[in-house]
Image: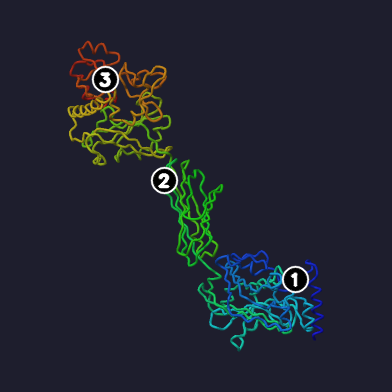
């Protein structure tokens, strides 16, 4: 019989030294023995090397059972000088689970061969780096020594599992000892040995659970690795209950070399592990918010991304991707941890580790460039199983509106900016069209004056520019005006347009805030306005009334014609708004190149008094001489509109002044 074994060993030795191509052909002939190249089990990519396939540094999902009790194979004393370890020595077990394919990857860790710094080849009894031959030096000492290729004969190696941790092994997987030299990889029931310290035997095969198997007699691939497929089904079938995340199991390994003269079996005693050690899970969630919404074109829009790990395991490699929408300029991306890499369509943030129960955030500041609805979507991914992938993406829609327009307005211009919020008199608001603001785009239903709703409106050209203007009428006793204080105050006209989004314009007014509004009362408060103008002129003799009531507009009013040196007029918005002026003065013009007085009508009217304590002067551009002859003291800073058939010095003129108060203009 030893002679037969030696002959078989010589045949296998010759076979093992054939070309690699021939070896590959033979390996494909071995039923159930295959190479696990380029497989991915979580972070373990199978190459046929247990140390490389189950790296300790790979993080969650790979479990190493090492440092436990072992029984290493006995080596005959006569061979101890030649063999220090064998292909049946075991130092631990590596485990990794892939929940997608439901496969448990298993590897038996073997020691250094003590010769080349490589791992002992599985089943290489004499450690000559080839499991199909026997070292001649060994045969010289023990001629009957055999080393069957590929765990042949009664040699076997496998891993046994106690699935429910009740002290009794349930299954064993690996190469079972059979009388043939080439055996199949199998998963079988485990037959417990009577001696508690002895490993179990292979029992009844459990077909349908055998995955891939890797056993190559090559120092580059020395270790035994395999997978058990449909593992959760196997657990349910053997134990009778579903596999739960907190299930505790034990795993041990055995390698038997009984056919090799004097080499006994090696045992790695079972060690416990929690199923979550090889199948860790977490629940990463992501939420995204935006502030403000809606946002105006050109303003800052701040996105906040919040990532949380609500699982029981840390995830060491959390990544957030964000698809920044078109139509925005990215100003900054600031993560609370990790690094950010921008892409043509957004950015990727490598957040690093997020502990169980931990969180991280990213702040993105952008500047929208065009109106409309923009959508921003962010997604979080991790390196371990996520129990709830439905919360791994979050999006937010943001309304972007056009930059808020600020068309020029005048409030009660013919009342010198005087309003009365305790009487049902009308408050007139002129909205001036400009080159970039079309009053026809105003959505009238949205218009408010300090909260009050208009009671009427009309469109016409009020000043002399080519753009239409719009006038809104408000009831002075509108309840929304109740909070406006008496005296000088500010009112705001707001609304939306079909093209600009929103607009808001402010004006200073003088609020009479009195019940009865007679011409005498009007004159009293107009005198108050004039007094304010006079007080202002003490510091600036050239100050006009518009500087008092509309300082924002007046601030843009002074432009100099470089050709004539004349002031160019009141600049409101993007166009020159002509406020009716007085003939002979050059403070109101339509173009810098033509600094001439533009009346806006045949004649104009100004406040009854502007602080100079002189009577109202009646002037018509074509009747100045007549007025003077009538004994009216002319004052070029104050004029009122009169009709040609009125007596300039008569009572009808005073009546005209009282009854035509809506015709008062804003110049002085």
**537 above or below 192?**
above
Q: Nearer the viewer, mark 2 or mark 3?
A: 3
Q: Residue at x 36, y 39 (%)?
A: 495
The answer to which of 261 and 530 lies nearer the viewer is 261
Quadrant containing the N terminus is bottom right
Q: Secondary structure at mark 3?
A: loop
Alpha carbon of mark 2 to alpha carbon of mark 1: how far? Answer: 67 Å
- Quarter of the figure with residue 40: bottom right
Name which quarter of the figure residue 208 lies in.
Answer: bottom right
Residue 333 to residue 658: above or below: below
Mark whose residue sits in front, 2 or 1: 1
- Which picture quadrant has residue 414? top left
Q: Report the front residue among 365 and 591.
A: 365
Q: Residues within 10 Å of mark 3 (few under 14, many from 20)?
A: some
Residue under label 1, please give it: 27
Please tell me whether mark 3 or mark 1 is closer to you in this view: 1
Above or below 226: residue 348: above
| Residue 617 drawn at (x, y percent) | 23, 18
List the residue tagged with mark 3.
Answer: 637
In space, the residues marked 3 and 1 are separated at their CA atoms by 112 Å
Where is residue 41 drawn, in percent x and y? 61, 66
Q: Is residue 601 left or right of residue 527?
A: right
């Amino acid at each position: 019989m030893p002679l037969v074994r030696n002959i078989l060993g010589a045949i296998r030795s010759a076979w093992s030294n054939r070309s690699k191509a021939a070896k590959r052909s033979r390996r494909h002939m071995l039923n159930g023995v295959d190479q696990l190249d380029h497989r991915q089990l979580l972070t373990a990519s199978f190459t046929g090397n247990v140390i490389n396939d189950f790296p300790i540094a790979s993080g969650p999902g790979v479990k190493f059972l090492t440092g436990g009790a072992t029984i290493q194979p006995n080596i005959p004393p006569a061979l101890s000088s030649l063999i220090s370890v064998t292909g049946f020595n075991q130092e631990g077990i590596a485990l990794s689970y892939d929940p997608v394919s439901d496969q448990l990857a298993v590897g038996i860790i073997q020691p250094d061969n003590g010769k080349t710094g490589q791992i002992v080849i599985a089943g290489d009894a004499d450690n000559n780096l080839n499991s199909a031959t026997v070292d001649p030096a060994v045969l010289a000492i023990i001629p009957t020594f055999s080393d069957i290729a590929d765990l042949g004969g009664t040699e076997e190696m496998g891993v046994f599992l106690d699935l429910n941790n009740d002290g009794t092994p349930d299954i064993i997987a690996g190469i079972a000892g059979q009388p043939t030299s080439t055996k199949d990889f199998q998963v079988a029931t485990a037959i417990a040995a009577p001696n508690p310290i002895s490993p179990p035997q292979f029992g009844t095969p459990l077909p349908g659970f055998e995955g891939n198997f890797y056993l190559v007699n090559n120092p580059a691939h020395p270790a035994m690795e395999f997978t058990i497929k449909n593992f959760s089904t196997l657990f349910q079938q053997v134990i009778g209950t579903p596999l739960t995340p907190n299930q505790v199991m034990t795993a041990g390994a055995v390698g038997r070399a009984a056919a090799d003269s004097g080499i006994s079996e090696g045992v790695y005693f079972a060690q416990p592990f929690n199923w979550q050690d090889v199948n860790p899970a977490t629940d990463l969630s992501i939420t995204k918010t935006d502030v403000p919404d809606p946002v105006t074109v050109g303003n800052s829009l701040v996105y906040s991304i919040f990532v949380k790990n609500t699982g029981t395991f840390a995830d060491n490699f959390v990544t957030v991707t964000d698809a920044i929408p078109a139509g925005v300029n990215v100003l900054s991306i600031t993560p609370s941890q990790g690094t950010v890499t921008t892409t043509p369509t957004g950015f990727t943030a490598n957040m690093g580790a997020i502990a169980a129960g931990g969180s991280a955030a990213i702040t993105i500041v952008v500047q929208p460039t065009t109106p409309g609805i923009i959508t921003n979507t962010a997604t979080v991914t991790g390196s371990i199983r996520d129990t709830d992938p439905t919360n791994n993406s979050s999006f937010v829609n943001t309304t972007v509106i056009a930059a808020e327009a600020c068309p020029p307005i005048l409030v009660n211009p013919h009342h010198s900016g005087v309003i009365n919020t305790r009487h049902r008199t009308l408050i007139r608001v002129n909205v001036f069209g400009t080159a970039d603001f079309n009053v026809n785009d105003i959505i009238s239903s949205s218009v408010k004056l300090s909260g009050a709703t208009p009671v009427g409106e009309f469109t016409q050209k009020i000043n002399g520019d080519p753009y239409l203007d719009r006038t809104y009428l408000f009831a002075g006793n509108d309840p929304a005006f109740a909070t406006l204080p008496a005296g000088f105050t500010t009112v705001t006209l707001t609304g939306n347009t079909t093209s600009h989004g929103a607009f808001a314009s402010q004006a200073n007014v003088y609020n009479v805030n009195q019940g009865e509004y007679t011409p005498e009362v009007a004159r009293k408060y107009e005198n108050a306005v004039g007094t304010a103008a006079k007080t202002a002129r003490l510091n600036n003799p050239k100050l006009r009334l518009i500087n008092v009531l509309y300082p924002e507009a007046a601030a843009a009013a002074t432009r100099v014609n470089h050709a004539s040196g004349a002031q160019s007029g009141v600049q409101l918005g993007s166009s020159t708004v002509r406020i009716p002026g007085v003939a002979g003065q050059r403070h109101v013009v339509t173009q810098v190149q033509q600094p001439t007085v533009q009346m806006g009508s045949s004649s104009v009217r100004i406040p009854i008094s502007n602080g100079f304590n002189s009577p109202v002067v009646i002037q018509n551009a074509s009747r100045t001489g007549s007025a003077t002859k009538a004994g009216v003291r002319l004052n070029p800073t104050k004029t009122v509109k009169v009709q040609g058939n009125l007596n300039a010095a008569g009572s009808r003129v005073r009546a005209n002044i009282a009854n035509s108060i809506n015709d008062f203009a804003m110049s002085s």
